[in-house]
Image: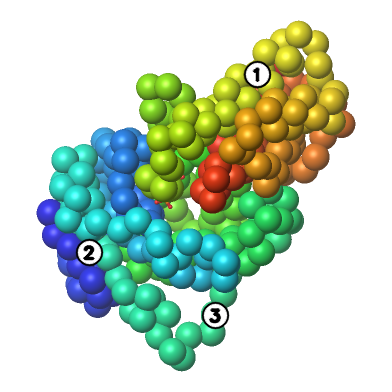
């Protein structure tokens, strides 16, 4: 496996692959890999002749009070895990490589970014769609892989790809969980042992909501209040948002007819975690 740090190097490496008609899969990441990341890499390995993983903690998707500085990083460990998952190339540019001082172009998706993390993290998705556009242009993959744990991100990138007529298949992958149900996340490494136990409130509240829906609670605002109360019963947990919305446009719903997305952002101590599930009636 190769690791490239510059755009020129990776472009040069990929030129012959493009020329020979090999298919290329891209997995964009911020590193500090877990099995969730590896599940995307393995799927990319299965679908493509070449697999590129980008590893870049993208500064422009972090707010001024967020954890850019402390975000966990370990390139050596990541390289081992990527190799184990069959990755051919890691692209690991510096912030200066991606955003030189002359930089002034941004990509923005409207509407879909108004709710959930778009509302609670202003500018976040502008940062995501900008970096993903750049990565798409640098790598020119046939397929790109995103986790449904970041459901809104998946929908936003899918929309951007369609709207910009990019010839790239955006593939959404299921959320990979710890055996006790906690969605895998690089940010789980911030949790102390008590917080790690408390963090189960996220996945449990998804199951709780599915059970209440099965009991007949299909009014979205009633179900949302029940989930909020359930989460607030945990003293170490504080709610950023609980939203029940439609799975395509991410707009709020009055009544759950056949299915709905329940999306959560909850702070456990200082760590903000997200999770979601599609509730089926
Ligand atoms: P990140 O490094 O957190 O930006 O994540 C890189 C990619 O991995 C994104 O598409 C995420 O949605 C995806 N991902 C993160 N956690 C998981 C998980 N537990 N299961 C599946 N995919 C995940």
Q: In this view, does 180 lie above or below 75?
A: above
Q: Position of residue 59 (x, y in %)?
A: 46, 70
Query: Which numbered disc, 1 or 2, marks the residue that appears first in the sequence?
Result: 2
Badge 2 crowding class, 10 Å Cα cut-off, few under 14, some 14 to 19, many 20 or more, is some
Q: Is residue 156 above or below residue 139?
A: above
Q: Distance between the Cα atoms at labels 1 and 2?
A: 47 Å
Instruction: Give residue 79's mark.
Output: none
Left or right position of 7 against 220: left
Q: Is mark 3 within 8 Å of ligand 1?
A: no
Instruction: Give residue 105's mark.
Output: 3
Residue named by callout 2: 14
Badge 3 crowding class, 10 Å Cα cut-off, few under 14, some 14 to 19, many 20 or more, is few
Camera-side residue of 238 and 116: 238
Residue at image x 23%, y 51%?
78
Q: Cβ–Cβ below 8 Å for labels 1 and 2?
A: no
Q: Is mark 2 within 8 Å of ligand 1?
A: no
Of badges 2 and 3, nearer the viewer stands: 3
């Amino acid at each position: 496996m190769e690791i490239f740090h510059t755009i020129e190097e990776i472009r040069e490496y990929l030129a012959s692959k493009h020329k020979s008609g090999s298919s290329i899969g891209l997995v964009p990441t911020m590193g500090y890999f877990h099995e969730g990341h590896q599940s995307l890499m393995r799927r990319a390995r299965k679908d493509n002749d070449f697999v590129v993983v980008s590893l870049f903690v993208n500064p422009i998707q972090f707010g001024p009070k967020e954890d850019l500085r402390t975000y966990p990083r370990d390139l050596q460990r990541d390289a081992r895990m990527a190799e184990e998952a069959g990755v051919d190339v890691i692209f690991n540019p510096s912030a200066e490589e991606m955003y030189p001082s002359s930089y002034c172009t941004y990509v923005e998706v409207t509407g879909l970014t108004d709710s959930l993390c778009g509302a609670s993290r202003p500018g976040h998705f502008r940062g995501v769609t900008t970096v993903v556009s750049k990565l798409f242009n640098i790598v020119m993959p046939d397929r790109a892989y995103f986790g449904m744990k970041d459901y809104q991100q998946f929908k936003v990138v899918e929309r951007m790809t369609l709207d910009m007529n990019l010839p790239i298949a955006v593939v959404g992958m299921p959320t990979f969980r710890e055996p006790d149900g906690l969605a895998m996340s690089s940010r789980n490494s911030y949790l102390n042992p008590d917080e790690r136990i408390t963090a189960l409130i996220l996945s449990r509240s998804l199951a709780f909501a599915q059970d209440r829906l099965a009991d007949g609670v299909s009014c979205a605002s009633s179900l949302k209040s029940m989930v909020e109360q359930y989460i607030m019963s945990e003293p170490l947990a504080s709610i950023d948002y609980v939203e029940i919305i439609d799975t395509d446009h991410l707009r709020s719903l009055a009544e759950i007819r056949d299915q709905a997305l329940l999306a959560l952002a909850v702070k456990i101590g200082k760590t903000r975690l997200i999770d979601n599930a599609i509730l089926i009636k």
